[in-house]
Image (cartoon, rainbow, N blue to C red):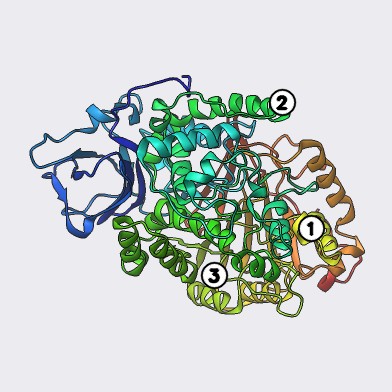
Amino acid sequence: MNAFTDHDMTSTILAGPMLRRASGERLVFWLASRVALQFRLLLPGCAPQEITGKGQQQLQVGERCFIQLLDIELDTRLPTDTLVAYDLQWRASQQDEWQAMVDWAPELCYPGEPLPQLVIRSRLDAILHGSCRKPHHAAPDGLVAADHWLEQCHTEPLDRPALLMLSGDQIYADDVAGPMLTAIHQLIEELGLYPETLEGALVANSAELFASPLNYYRRSELLPSSEDTQSLRKRFFEGARKPIFTTSSADNHLITLAEVLAMYLLVWSPTPWQSLTEQQPELPPARRQQYRIERERLVGFVEGLPAVRRLLAHVPTLMIFDDHDVTDDWNLTAAWEASAYGHPFSRRIIGNALVGYLICQGWGNDPDAFNEQPMTLLQAWSQQPTAKRQDRLINHVFSIEHWHYSLPTTPKLLVLDTRTRRWRAETHLGQPSGLMNWEALTELQGELLHHDAVIIVSPTPVFGVKLIEVIQKIFTWCGKPLLVDAENWMAHKGTANVILNIFRHARTPANYVILSGDVHYSFMYDIKLRHRGGEPHIWQITSSGIKNEFPERLLDVLDRLNRWLYAPRSPLNWFTRRRRLEITPHPPVAASRGERLLNRSGIGYVRFNDAGEPVSVQQITAEGAVEFVADTVPEPAASAPAATQDRER
């Protein structure tokens, strides 16, 4: 498939249906369409159920683009652990015939399926999870690998995962390929996505931005050259250039809400690409070569989108943001916040990304949490997209404190917001903020009480690679936390102490599984508290990235240095906040001696037993599944005092 050739322009459904929530009493779907639509749902043995009233929320975001959230209270309870075929039909008006999925989306079915099938699991006994999906990265797309994996087991309901958890960086709003930005602008024009005015920049509105010579690869120059904006430019735009751990660039940072919404459509569905033509902007020679390389990678990405769309139609999919969904280093320090939110241009950029997250991700995570004021303000902006209404919407979105959510499953699932409720370092504004403040952590502890087992989704690993955390700390001491993404749970004393005390609390769960992403490599740690008889038992399972990888040679060096410097008998362990923990790595099967980290794009898969303990941990990749060793034997006790020894190997 050539993503840049002309295709049929009549496809009504632009993206979706994406299955967001599924229970016996309720199904939630997210879609995007070119026109306003009516929907009905057909399930086996049930009369057609028209979706009316609060069951369908339809948001117009352009002249020819409507975002749909279908929150369906079912007339008949669905069985668990059973394949359930569904037919989501639509029509444009009462006079039109209903369009069945066999007609408008036959490609969403696996071989042998007449319709897409979902399964509502009685227990949360298996999860797919991952983060960090950069379209123009050279690595294969882990969501495509997940679709191919599901195709092999989709007929067996007990072999299917209960859900897919996307734990951050579903889009890279701050790191956009030139050809992707070209496609975004074509799609904006085709769908008539709403324009907007801009304040505090060298362009007054989105039309001037798109016509500006600074539109491609030069967006960091859009701020006026004055002393007031030098700090902002450095923190907001140049903060993405980190020679230590990433090589991303903010030169094509998404700015308008229309750009953000178009980006979501283009990363989740092949349909929007079908009407686009190849239009390379005028670029200097060095950028032309970059543009060609990015285009080659994007063509491969687009070729995988039919599989991605099929996967998302079959498996309930939950999400939570991390920094790149908004901007790199989002809320990293109090000083960053003061600069970024204090200028109208950067405030609008952040606000637009967060509104886009609300519409395309957060809304489907927990529809009940956003039914009132956010939806009222969104509908008001939709009906009259003025700057005043957009600012009012953004101001409200900045005040939301319930991006986190939970599922009443067995075991319970808790999804953390580690971005908007930070524990700020008030005396040293340039120091990294804690990932969650005291109030948020107190609420978390309340959610954990009286549960035997719990699965926590933390975008950033709670227990990471110590050497990398030490390097981040050194850069922080030097006043340069932005250079190395110096955010980890142990970087802030208050946050670190509280989260570790929560794990020590006598009435919190016996078994914790922490699912994380963010770091662009995968690993598994087994963690126990000393002198507590083996409880609680904590597993840190990290899968990253879906379509991103760490620089291979650098990761190999850091992995081995970490094992040498923080061996069980190393005195360096005495200086870590984790010194009262026994941490045992579970290496990938067939890993070379000393290798603990897996640097391969894909999607994580975890299966749990009845006690909520992980019994199988894999990274599903384009080359096949890589299993992590299930059990390892802790090394003999070292001569160091037990209270200050960390057995991480």
Marks 3 and 2 sit apart, C-alpha to C-alpha, by 59 Å
Kindly identify which numbered label has been placed on residue 466.
1
Closer to the eye: label 1 or 2: 2
For badge 2, the amino acid type reads Pro
Query: In the structure shown, which secondary structural element does the residue marked by tag 1 occupy?
Result: helix
Mark 1, other Cα within 10 Å: few <14 / some 14–19 / many ≥20: many
Tell me residue 534's x, y (percent): 66, 67
Determine if residue 623 is in view.
no
- Left or right: residue 406 versus residue 69 is right
Say what amino acid the circle numbered 1 marks.
Answer: Lys
Q: Secondary structure at mark 2?
A: helix
Residue where numbered disc 3 is placed: 509
State which quadrant residue 527 falls in. Answer: bottom right
Residue 54 is situated, as x and y percent measured from the top left of the image, at 22, 60
Q: Give 204 or 31, whichever is nearer the viewer.
A: 204
Task: Sort mark 2 into few (<14), some (14-19) or many (20+) by Cα contacts within 10 Å.
Answer: few
- Quadrant of residue 431 within the rendered picture: bottom right
Compute the Cα span from label 1 to label 3.
Answer: 25 Å
Q: Which residue is mark 2?
A: 285
